[in-house]
Every structure is written in structure tokens, then in C-alpha cells.
Amino acid sequence: MTDEEKLVPESEDQEIKVKSKFEDSVQADIVEITQGGANHIQAKEVILRQAGATHIESNLVHVRQGGVVKVETDRLELTEGGVILANSGSVEMTASQAVVIVNQGNVNMDQCGVQVLVTKGNVQVDQSGIVATIANHVTLENNSNVVFLLAKNVDGEVKTQFGPKESALFGMMAGLAAGVVLLTGAMFGKKRKKKA
């Protein structure tokens, strides 16, 4: 952070803009980072453009062509970006990727991919894919896929990835793989000497 940015008066709304550099920790009312990054950001509003962050705590987060490892926010708007772990109130995603989303409200996905999505609200999925989701209500549109789906209500065309035969085969193969790993560990693992 430059000396000018550090001297912003406390009584006014603070806005910090970072361009083409990396900051360790940033705290202000509004943080805007372009082609840069930060380890930890704490603000009311965060805007990342072609930028990244390790951890964000904010009321509103906009990410455009950027990435975040962990975000805790009331509202997340992600466009052509990625997030590893999002704990949020609501999520809007367009052409983006996420590993885990834990959400309190609604999720809208357009041309996105998510590994695990758990929400108390509704999920709107358009031309997107989800590996596993748990939600109140799921609406699938235009060639969307979900591998594991647990929801009270589902609208749209659901293409099951696992029918009864596939589910049984998957369970047997997963059990066999786990058994082989445990058996190999028992046979070739370190032998512990018993104390006398």
C-alpha cells in the first residue's frame, strides 16, 4: 500500500484501488483490485478485475476474470472467474468455476461448473454442470447436468447419470477401491514395535 493510500481519513468512506501489484492485507469500505492481488481483504465491497485473493470477508464481492481461494460474503457475483470455497448469502455465476459453495440463499448459474453446491435456497442452472448438489428447489435448463442431486423440488429435464444399476456398480467399485487401499496399508505400512 502506498503512503497516500494509508493516509485516508477514518471518518470518510475509504476506497482503496490497487493496480498491478500484490498486497498482503487490505482493509477499507471499498476495495478495487485490477491485475493484482491480496492475501486478505476485509471490506464492505470488493471488486476484483483480472485479480486474485486468498481470503475475502465482505458484504458484496464482484469477481471478473479473477480467482479467490476463500470468500465469505452476503452476495457473490462471479463472471469468468473461479473460487475454491464460497460461504455466501447469494451467488450469481456466469462462465465461472467453483469447487465448494455453501450458500444461505439462491444460486444462479449460467455456463458454469461447480463440484459441490449446498444451499438452503433455490438453484437456477442454465447450460451448467454440478457434480453434487443439495438444495431446496432446483431448476435445470438448456443442457444442464447434475451427477448427484438431492432436492425437495426439481424442474426441468433431469438426465440421470446414475440409475439403479450404475449406483450399485459405483458402490461396489468404491468399496473395492477403499478395501484395496486399507489392505495395502496394513500389509506394507510401517510395523510398530510393541513396548514390553
Image (cartoon, rainbow, N blue to C red):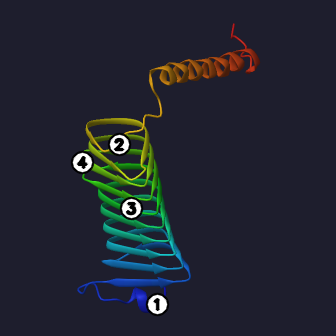
The amino acid type of the residue labelled 4 equals Gly
Task: Measure how far apart labels 3 and 1 are at the Cα level.
Answer: 36 Å
Residue under pointer 2: 157
| Residues at marks 2 and 3, CA–CA distance in whole angstroms | 21 Å
Location of residue 125 in the rendering, given as x and y in whole percent from the top left corner: 35, 52
Q: Residue 39 location, x and y as percent?
A: 50, 67
Label 1 element class: helix
Instruction: Determine which residue is flagged by label 3.
Output: 93
Residue at screen point 46% across, 90% down: 3
Q: Which one is closest to the eye, mark 2 or mark 4?
A: 2
Which numbered mark, 3 or 1, is in the foreground of this view? 3
Q: Amino acid at mark 3?
A: Met
N-terminal of the two: label 1 or label 4?
Answer: 1
Give the secondary structure at mark 2. Answer: loop
Please state which of the two labelled residues, at mark 2 or mark 3, is closer to the viewer. 2
Q: Which residue is mark 1?
A: 3
Question: Which class describes the residues within 10 Å of circle 2: few (<14), some (14-19), or many (20+)?
Answer: few
- Expressed as whole percent of the image width and height from the top left, the position of residue 153 reads 24, 38
Instruction: Name the residue carrying label 4.
Output: 121
In the image, residue 169 above or below residue 12: above
Q: 40 or 86, which is in the foreground?
A: 86
